[in-house]
Image (cartoon, helix red, strand yellow):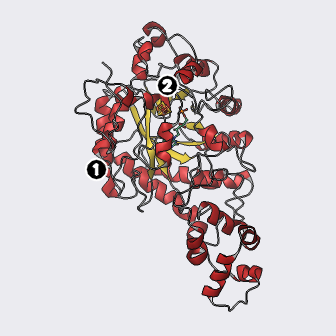
Amino acid sequence: MSDRRREKLLPIERWPTAQEAAASRWFSPVQVGPVRAATRTWVPAMVPWRATGEGFVTDAVVGWYERFARGRPGVIVIEATGIRDVPSGPLLRAGHDRFVEGLSRLTRAVREASGGHTKLFVQLIDFLAIKRRPTREAFLGRFLTLTPRLRQALGAPLDAPDAAVRERLLSLTEAALLQVLDAREADALRFGQRERVTDTHLPHIAGLPQVLPGLFADAARRCVAAGFDGIELHYAHAYTMASFLSARNTRSDGWGGPREQRVRLPLDVFAAVRSAVPAHVAVGCRFLADEIIEGGSGVDDAAYFATRFARAGMDFVSLSRGGKFEDAKQPKVGQAAYPYTGPSGHECMPTTKLPAPGPFGRNLPAVAHITKTLRSEGLATPVVACGGIASFWQAEAVLEAGEADLVASARQSLADPDWFEKVRQGRGDEVRRCLFTNYCEGLDQSHEVVTCHLWDRLKGQPDDATVPRTTDGRRLVAPPWS
Ligand SMILES: Cc1cc2nc3c(=O)[nH]c(=O)nc-3n(C[C@H](O)[C@H](O)[C@H](O)COP(=O)(O)O)c2cc1C
Ligand code: SF4
C-alpha cells in the first residue's frame, strides 16, 4: 500500500486551536497516585535497541528520550528495563547498582529537555529464556534431550547409544518425526526452545514466585535512586508476569489455575515494590485487557485483575492487548520467535493492513469495560488507554466518555515527538502523522536500532550534517521542528 493511500486511512479531522487544546481534557493535569502529571498525554514504553550490549545507557538512549521530552508529554515511560543482572543484549537493565549512574543521566536529560514538565516512569520487566529456531540437524543431532519416553516412542532400547538414537531421528520423515516428538519437543524444533512459567520441573521456574518480588523491588529501588518519578511493572504481552496472569498458566502449586491464584504473584511483586520505594513514587502496572489467544485470559479476567490491583493500591493501570508467543509466526532458522507476528501481535501493534475499522482505537471497548468495572467498585485508579490513538479528538473523546483517564500514543509519538507540543500550540497541521506501517516494529523484531522511516524522507534538514546516524545511515533522532 502506498503512503498516499495510507494517509487517506488516517482519521480525518481538523486540528484544535490553541484555545481548544488549552481547554481540553487531554491537556489538563491529572493525579497519578502521588505524582501530578501536567497533562493526560502519555508516551508508553518503546524499546529502541540503543543500550550497550551490557545494558548500560548510551548517548543514543539519552538522545532518544530527550527528543520525546522536547514534545513535553505528561508522562514518558522508559522502555522495558531488565530486573536481572544477566546478559540480555542492548536492552536497558536495572539489575545492579552499576546501572544507576547511566539511568540518572537519563532522568536528568528528560527533566532538562522538558523544562521539568514531563514525569518519567520506567517499565520493569522479567522474561524467560528463549532460543533461536535451530536447524533440524542441530536440534535432533545435539539439543534434543533423549528421554526414555522418546526412546520408547521410537521403538529404541532404553540403553541404545545416543548416537544411534539421534541417527534414527535424523532419518525420519517430517510426518514420522512429529509422531514421536511430544508437543513441547515439536514446538522447540519448529519455533526454538522457550521456557514457560509452567515448567515447574525446572527449579529456577518453580522458584519464580519466591525470587521475583525481591528482584523487582531491588530494581525499583535503583530506579528511584536514579531519579524516576514512577515505576511501571511490565505485566503485559509475552513476558514472565503476563504469563502468570494468563489463563494458560496451569501451575498446580498455588501460583496458577484459577484467576485468584494467577494474580497472586503480580500482587506480591507489587507489594514488594511498593514497600521498597518512597511514597512520592508512583507504582502501577501495564497488563493486557485481553490476551486474544485461544484459551487465554479475556476482558472479564482483566477487569478482575484491575480490581485486585486497584484494591491493592496501585497508582495506575495501563492497558495493552495481545502480543503473545502462543500464536506467533514460525521464525526462520536462526531467528527467535517474536510475539507480535500472529493475530494477537497484530492487535497489539495494529497496522493499516487490518480490515475496517483499521488500526485506530481497537483496544477501547475492552479498556472502557475495565474502567467501568473499576468505577462500579468505587475505585478511582487512573486507567491509561493505548493502541492506534493518533489524533487529538480521538484522545479527547476517550476522556470525555470516561473510558480512560490518560491517553497514550506510541508510534505517533515516535513519528513526531513534537506532536503534543504542536497540537497544544494550535499548530496541528504541522504534525508528521504516523502511517501505521510498522517499519519501526520490524526493526524491533530484528533487534535493530529503531527509527521511523518518515524521518529520512525529509531532505535538507538543518541538522542533516550533525545528526547522529545508524551504521546504515538512518537518522537516530527525529528531524527538528523549526
Ligand atoms: C518499536 C516498539 C517498541 C515497543 N516496546 C515496548 C515495550 O518495551 N514495552 C511495552 O509495553 N510495549 C512496547 N511497545 C508497544 C507500545 O507501547 C504500544 O502498546 C503499541 O505500539 C500500540 O500503541 P500505538 O498504536 O500508539 O503505537 C513497543 C512498540 C514499538 C512500536
Ligand atoms: S515507522 Fe513506525 S512510527 Fe514511523 S510511520 Fe511507520 S509505524 Fe509510524
Q: Quadrant of the N terminus?
A: top right
Residue 127 placement (x, y as % from top left): 53, 56
Q: Quadrant of the C terminus?
A: top left
Point 34% across, 48% down: residue: 225
Name the amino acid, label 2: Arg
Residue 87 versus residue 204: which sits nearer the camera?
Answer: 87
Is 234 above or below relative to 162? above
Whether residue 40 is visible here, answered yes or no, is yes
Residue 304 placement (x, y as % from top left): 70, 42
Is 92 above or below relative to 96? above
Residue 249: image tag: none
Is 326 above or below relative to 411? below
Is 461 above or below relative to 81? above
**Residue corresponding to mark 1:** 101
Under tag 2, what secondary structure? loop
Name the amino acid, label 1: Glu
Residue 253 placement (x, y as % from top left): 69, 66
**Ligand 1 lies under 8 Å from the Cβ of mark 2:** no
Residue 405 versus residue 242: which sits nearer the camera?
Answer: 242
Image position of 335 (left or right of 164): left
**Residue corresponding to mark 2:** 40
Image position of 358 (left or right of 7): right
Point 45% across, 23% down: residue: 39
Point 51% across, 20% down: residue: 26
Question: Which of the two discs, 2 and 1, labels the residue nearer the N terminus?
Answer: 2
Kindly report the distance in space between the C-alpha atoms of the residues bearing marks 2 and 1: 29 Å
Under tag 1, what secondary structure? helix
Residue 47 versus residue 454: which sits nearer the camera?
Answer: 454
